[in-house]
Structure formats: C-alpha cells, structure tokens
C-alpha cells in the first residue's frame, strides 16, 4: 500500500514539476526541461535528505509489521506480527480509514488499483518524453 502512494506521487511530480518550471522556490528555480531530465539536475544534498526520509519510513514500517529477527525461528525468516494488517500503519490523520474490516479491504484494493494505474501513467510519461524530448505538460497544452 505504501508503494502505491509513491507511484501516485510520481505521476503528480511529473505534472507539477513541469508546470512550475522556472517559478518554484525549490532548487533556486534552476530545474528545467521535461520531467525525465529533472533527476540529473537536482543538487546532491537533496538525495541525502530523501534517503534519510525513505529509510526512516521503511524502518517504521518494518518495526510495525515484522517480528524482530532475533525472535524468529530460523526456518521462518520475515515473519509478520500476528496483529499486523498489511498496509495499515496506523497513520490516518484525516480519519478516512473505514472501521469495518471488509470496507477497509475494499479501500485497500482500490488504492492498489489506483497505484497500478499510476505506474502505467508514469511509464507512459517516460516513454513519451523519451520519444520526442518534450514534456508531458507541453503535450497537454498543445492539444
């Protein structure tokens, strides 16, 4: 479930990153061109911050869902905690999580489907930008 959020953010990043080009307060507004070229233009310090943020998120997820490796039998590596529900990290600041377990499963399925659709959209964006070197927003505006 967490990975689908990353996928959906990637699609938003493509569109927003190209739309605010040259006018963003981030990175002194120096990142330009199609989104596919933005990663190479980001300063190195950003990657350290991103690595720490992702590492902290993954550490929290691992501690929430998996049994401590020192307490796991050798023949059961990666054992999940008995009370852990995949994708439920207890983070719901807007109170959107359904109380009913069946409704929660339906919501999880919808989120997975949206994440898969976002992966396809991002792949399409990458392919289009690789094909002609123009940004997605530029294509949308020329329609």
Image (cartoon, grey):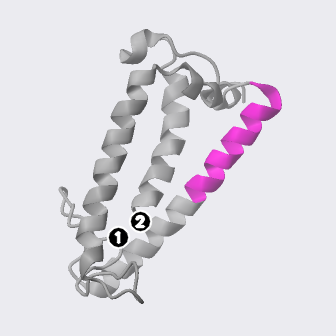
**Quadrant of residue 38 within the rendered picture:** top right
Rendering coords of residue 19 (x, y %): 52, 24
Label 1 close to label 2 by CB (< 8 Å): yes
Work out whether 45 lies above or below 82: above
In this rendering, position of residue 125 left or right of residue 6: right
Whether the magenta-drawn stretch holds residue 132 is answered as: yes
Residue 106, disc:
none
| Residue closest to the far right | 131
Q: Quadrant of the N terminus?
A: bottom left
Residue drawn at point x = 64 percent, y = 31 percent: 36
Q: Which residue is mark 2?
A: 1
- Read off the magenta span: 117-133
Q: Residue 35: which quarter of the image?
A: top right
* Numbered circle sitting on residue 87: 1
Of pointers 1 and 2, the one earlier in the residue sequence: 2
Quadrant for the C terminus in the image: top right
Q: Position of residue 76 (x, y in %)?
A: 40, 87
Q: Nearer the viewer, residue 89 or 79?
A: 79
Q: From the viewer's perspective, is 121 left or right of 99?
A: right
């Amino acid at each position: 479930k967490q990975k689908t959020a990353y996928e959906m953010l990637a699609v938003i990043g493509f569109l927003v990153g190209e739309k605010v080009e040259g006018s963003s307060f981030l990175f002194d507004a120096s990142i330009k061109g199609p989104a596919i070229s933005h990663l190479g233009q980001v300063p190195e310090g950003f990657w350290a911050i991103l690595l720490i943020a992702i590492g902290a998120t993954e550490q929290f997820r691992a501690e929430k869902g998996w049994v401590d490796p020192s307490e796991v039998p050798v023949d059961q590596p990666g054992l999940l905690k008995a009370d852990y529900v995949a994708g439920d990290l207890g983070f719901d600041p807007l109170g959107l999580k359904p109380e009913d377990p069946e409704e929660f499963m339906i919501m999880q399925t919808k989120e997975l489907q949206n994440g898969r659709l976002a992966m396809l959209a991002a792949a399409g964006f990458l392919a289009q930008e690789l094909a002609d070197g123009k940004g997605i927003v530029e294509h949308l505006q020329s329609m």
